[in-house]
Image (tube, rainbow, N blue to C red):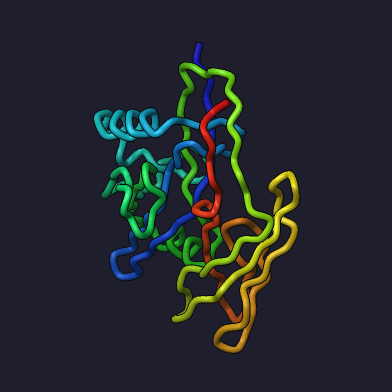
Amino acid sequence: MTERVDRQLTSIKKVDEELQIVWGEVYVPELPDSQGDFMTTLEVRKMAYSFMYAGRLGKVDMNHDNTINGSMIVESFIARSDDAVFIPGSWVVGMHIPDKEIWGMIKSGEINGFSMQARAMKKEPTTLKVLIPEIVTGTTDEADGHTHRFRVEFNDEGRLIEGLALEADGHVHSIIAPTLTEEADGHAHRFSILEKMTPNSPV
């Protein structure tokens, strides 16, 4: 018996305005996804390769509505250990977005990441410990020609308490989600905190 699962974990990390391509991790190994499950590095690699073998590069919809929208995966790779942008071991894709309306939703931050739809063939109960610092700092992705330093706080359960993208270019942004600031001065910023999370071995 299989179970259909829809998961979202990571955000868009790179955008090429001219080519209308976005890049981001589809799945990060050894960290829990939106349903509390996780995969090993080996299983993530197998999944990425199986997807490519199946040739489903144009099977892209939005919000799991099962309506193909013309977007196409044009790059797919496993992030190497020395990758400066993506989390090592992750499945990363680059996606071309030809539709102007969808591209506008990406630029505005309304669409902010990849969500994987798959069928889970086998699930094994496992406990995974993940260390989330109480305070995480970093730098947002560039938007409107600048970046912000950001600071977010988490409670003991790993839930976002509050966050702020500090002043830059004459304004600040509140942080409303673990991957996106609120809009200010006509734009929003993406950012990632997954690199600050430390997975331990399954116990």
Residue depicted at 75% across the width and 51% down the height: 155
Q: Picture coordinates of residue 193 (x, y %)?
A: 55, 56
Residue depicted at 34% across the width and 52% down the height: 95
> Where is residue 173, by image quadrant?
bottom right
Task: Tell whether 4 sits left or right of 103.
Answer: right
> Where is residue 36, by image quadrant?
top right
Q: Picture coordinates of residue 68 (x, y %)?
A: 40, 41
Label total for image: 0
**Image quadrant in which the C terminus is located:** top right
Q: Picture coordinates of residue 61 (x, y %)?
A: 44, 43
Residue ranking furthest to the bottom? 170
Residue depicted at 59% across the width and 40% down the height: 130
Q: Nearer the viewer, residue 98 or 44?
A: 44
Q: Is residue 119 above or below residue 103?
A: above
Q: Is residue 44 above or below residue 159?
A: above
> Where is residue 12, by image quadrant?
bottom left
| Residue 98 seen by the camera | no
Q: Picture coordinates of residue 115 (x, y %)?
A: 49, 42
| Residue 106 seen by the camera | yes
Residue depicted at 49% across the width and 53% down the height: 195
